[in-house]
Structure formats: C-alpha cells, structure tokens
C-alpha cells in the first residue's frame, strides 16, 4: 500500500520498533593486567614463587634442617642448588625460606595499606583540624628509622615474625597515606563526588564506592615498591643474624653464605636470585595493575565531570 502523502509533502511512515539496548560488559581487570607484557611477566614470576612456597613440603627433596650429604657440595642432579657448610640441602632451604620471606613481606604490606588508606583518606576527605592532626602524626612516623627500630624491638623482646611484621607495618604507611590524601584532595570536589553527596550518600559510602577505587592505581605502585623494600629489610635482618632462628628465610641463607663466598658461590647466588626475582615480579605486576586502574580511573573522572577548585584548608 503506498504511503499516505500529506499536504506538506512529507510521507507518513509507520513508527519503527525501538532497538534493543545493548549493555557492554567491562572485561575483568585481571584480563587487562595479563594483556600487558609486564603484567604477564610479573604474574608469572610472582605466581611461580608463591606456588613454590606453598608446595615446599611436597617439592623439597629433604628436610631443610637435616644433614643429607657432605658439606659444600656444588649443584648437581642429587642436590640442585648444592649443600651448605654443614651438609644441608640448599634447594630445600630456599623453598622453605620463600614461605617466611613472602609471609613477612605480604603481612607488612597489608598492615601498611590498612593504616595508610584509613589515615590518608580520612585526612583528605574531612580536612580541617583532623587533616592537620593526622598529617603531624604522619610526619612523626615518617622520620622513624624503620630498620633500627626493628633492631631495638628484637633486642628488647626477642626475635619473632610477629614482631617484625607489626614493627615494619606500623612504620611503613606514611608515604602511602600522603599519596592517598593528595588523590582524595584532587577528587573530592569532582562532579561524581558532589552528585553522590546530593543523593544523600554517607561519607563512608563515598569513600568506599567513589574515592577508594580511584586511588588504588597510585597505591598499587607504592605497595609494590614497599613489598620489595620489606623483602630487602627482612633479608638484611637475616643477614645480620637478627631473624628468627627457628625458621628459614632468604636473608638468613644469604647471611650464612658470607663466610663461604670464595669457596661456595652457590650459597649466596640462589637466595639472592630468589630475592631479586620476587622483587622484580611484584613490581612488574604492580606497574601493570596501576596502568589498568589508572586508565579506568581517568575514564571515570572524565565521565564524572571537570575538576573544581579545591577548598582552602
């Protein structure tokens, strides 16, 4: 049937059916991280070391404290990393040492993130006297020498992993708190935060749903650096003989090797290589994670609106 022609000359067409709404699902963040070269390499190194640490009782060929062969044997098929100065299998010791070193570094990183996130975001979001008070406390903790403080704590209370984790964790958060405070100060007056306030969202909900996801990119880089620093600090404590003598760590193994550097190169090489690979893997993974979160945060900020001038403190 030909269309009806109005006097104005326009054709009267039947109304078209509405098109179905297509929702675009955002790909998982871990896929975006693994799509980056540094993310794949970092994840591979970190996952391999973590798997070796978890499966140490199954993979270790012998008890790390048992005398299994002659002292100072070079690497061979029987002993993949050789033996130490009293005949213990070094490969087994490195596997069990991974448990201690990664546990200490992970525990310190978690404690520092919790303290730094709470203090930094509260100071940046609330401002005023609370901001001033929290920043002065941050200045106090920032000037504390972490390494010597751990040495004093060990000298007073004895060696122990819990003391090392708490001491390092409670003194490693100031830089993270300052960075997160700066991020919150830059975002708290953006349109998407103002809109959340206008809808009646509480301060805690705004921090948890709006501000915290947009500050994780900067926090991820700092946490990766902190993880590596803690590994080196723990290795330094073990190297000086200040670690827990009842557990093995990479630093303790490196410290025991200092008297055999000229005659048994493998005693220092393999623990030091494990520390280097762990630091490299975590930092590469943190950089990739920060790149993914940073891109999503920038898109969200652009969608949320332009920046407004920050309120005077």
Image (cartoon, helix red, strand yellow):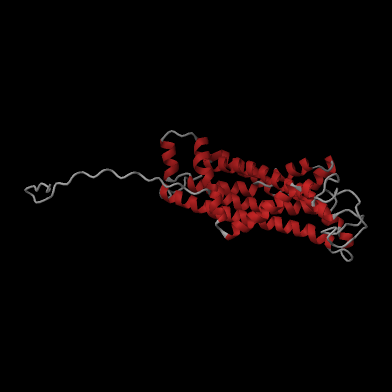
Residue 171 visible to the viewer: no
Name the residue located 45 percent from the left edge and 48 percent from the top edge.
300
Name the residue located 86 percent from the left edge and 46 percent from the top edge.
245
Name the residue located 68 percent from the left edge and 51 percent from the top edge.
227
> Is residue 40 placed above or below 19 in the rendered structure?
below
Give the camera-side residue of 47 and 290. Answer: 47
Residue farthest along the left direction in this orientation: 7
> Is residue 82 placed above or below 8 in the rendered structure?
below
The quadrant in which residue 228 appears is bottom right
Residue farthest along the front direction in this orientation: 1
Where is residue 63? Give x, y as percent. Answer: 86, 48
> Is residue 206 placed above or below 292 in the rendered structure?
above
Where is residue 271? Give x, y as percent. Answer: 79, 57
Q: Is residue 151 left or right of residue 296?
A: right
The quadrant in which residue 153 appears is top right
Residue 228 visible to the viewer: yes
Q: How many marks?
A: 0
């Amino acid at each position: 049937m030909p269309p009806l022609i109005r006097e104005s000359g326009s054709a009267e067409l039947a109304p078209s059916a509405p098109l179905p709404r297509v929702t675009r699902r955002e790909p998982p963040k871990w896929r975006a991280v693994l799509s980056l070269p540094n993310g794949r390499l970092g994840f591979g190194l970190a996952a391999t070391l973590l798997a070796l640490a978890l499966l140490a009782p199954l993979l270790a060929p012998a008890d790390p404290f048992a005398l299994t062969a002659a002292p100072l044997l070079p690497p061979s098929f029987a002993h993949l990393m050789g033996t130490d100065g009293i005949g213990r299998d070094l490969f087994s010791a490195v596997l069990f040492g991974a448990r201690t070193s990664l546990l200490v570094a992970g525990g310190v990183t978690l404690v520092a993130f919790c303290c730094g996130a709470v203090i930094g975001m509260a100071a940046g979001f609330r401002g005023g006297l609370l901001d001033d008070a929290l920043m002065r406390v941050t200045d106090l903790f920032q000037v504390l020498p972490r390494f010597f403080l751990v040495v004093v704590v060990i000298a007073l209370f004895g060696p122990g992993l819990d003391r090392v984790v708490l001491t390092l964790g409670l003194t490693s958060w100031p830089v993270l708190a300052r960075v997160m405070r700066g991020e919150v100060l830059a975002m708290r007056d953006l349109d998407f935060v103002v809109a959340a306030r206008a809808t009646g969202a509480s301060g805690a909900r705004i921090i948890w749903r709006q501000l915290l996801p947009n500050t994780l990119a900067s926090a991820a880089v700092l946490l990766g650096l902190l993880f590596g620093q803690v590994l080196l600090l723990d290795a330094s404590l073990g190297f000086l003989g200040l670690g827990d003598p009842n557990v093995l760590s990479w630093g303790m193994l490196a410290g025991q090797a200092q008297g055999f550097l000229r005659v048994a190169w493998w005693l220092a090489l393999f623990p030091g290589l494990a520390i280097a690979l762990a630091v490299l893997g975590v930092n590469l993974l943190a950089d990739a994670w920060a790149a993914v979160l940073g891109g999503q945060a920038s898109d969200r900020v652009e969608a949320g609106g332009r920046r407004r001038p920050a309120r005077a403190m």
